[in-house]
Amino acid sequence: MFQRSRAKGSVTLVMKRYDGRNRPEPREGKKPLPEPEHHFCLIRATLRKKTISTVIAPKDVNKFQMAYSSLLKGNLDGLKKTKKVKSKSKATQ
């Protein structure tokens, strides 16, 4: 996905807390769903219309962070530097 975005486009990465629910929350008056013991991490990557996602368990977060950081280090070389606009100094006026 990063290789395809080099020519044109950008990859959007989203990390969210995920409690494992696949269904909406129950209505008022109904008994609430029990709170999960562990919260997972939901990762989504989007390039144009192509989306991939995965869920990371709490025990695998460290391993994922190491792989994620090496992926970003290898693919963030396409960033453009911003040009600073120099203002006229008072000494030249």
Image: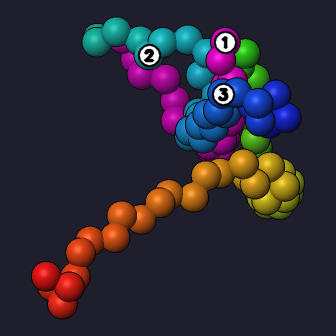
Q: Nearer the viewer, mark 1 or mark 3?
A: 3
Task: State whether residue 47 is above or below residue 19.
Answer: above
- Distance in Å between CA atoms under marks 1 and 2: 28 Å
The part of the image, by quadrant, that contains residue 36 is top right
Measured from the top left, where is residue 17 in percent x and y?
Answer: 56, 40
Q: What residue is drawn where x is 61% and y is 52%? A: 80
Measured from the top left, where is residue 89 in percent x and y?
Answer: 22, 82
Instruction: Indicate the secondary structure of the residue bearing disc 1.
Output: loop
Look at mark 2 in the image and give the residue it sits on.
Answer: 25
Circle 1 residues within 10 Å: few <14, some 14–19, many ≥20: few
The part of the image, by quadrant, that contains residue 13 is top right
Which residue is nearer to you in this view: 10 or 41? 10
Left or right of 13, for residue 29? left
- Distance in Å between CA atoms under marks 1 and 3: 11 Å
Amino acid carrying mark 1 in the image: Lys
Look at mark 1 in the image and give the residue it sits on.
Answer: 49
Amino acid carrying mark 3 in the image: Gly
Look at mark 3 in the image and give the residue it sits on.
Answer: 9
Which quarter of the rendered picture does the N terminus lie within? top right
- Is 48 part of what is drawn in magenta? yes
> Which is more N-terminal, label 3 or label 1?
3
Looking at the rendering, the stretch of residues picked out in magenta corresponds to: 30-49
Q: Do the residues labelled 3 and 2 touch (CB within 8 Å)?
A: no
Picture mark count: 3
- Distance in Å between CA atoms under marks 3 and 2: 36 Å
Instruction: Indicate the secondary structure of the residue bearing disc 2.
Output: loop
Could one spot residue 68 in this view of the protein? no
Q: Do the residues labelled 1 and 2 touch (CB within 8 Å)?
A: no
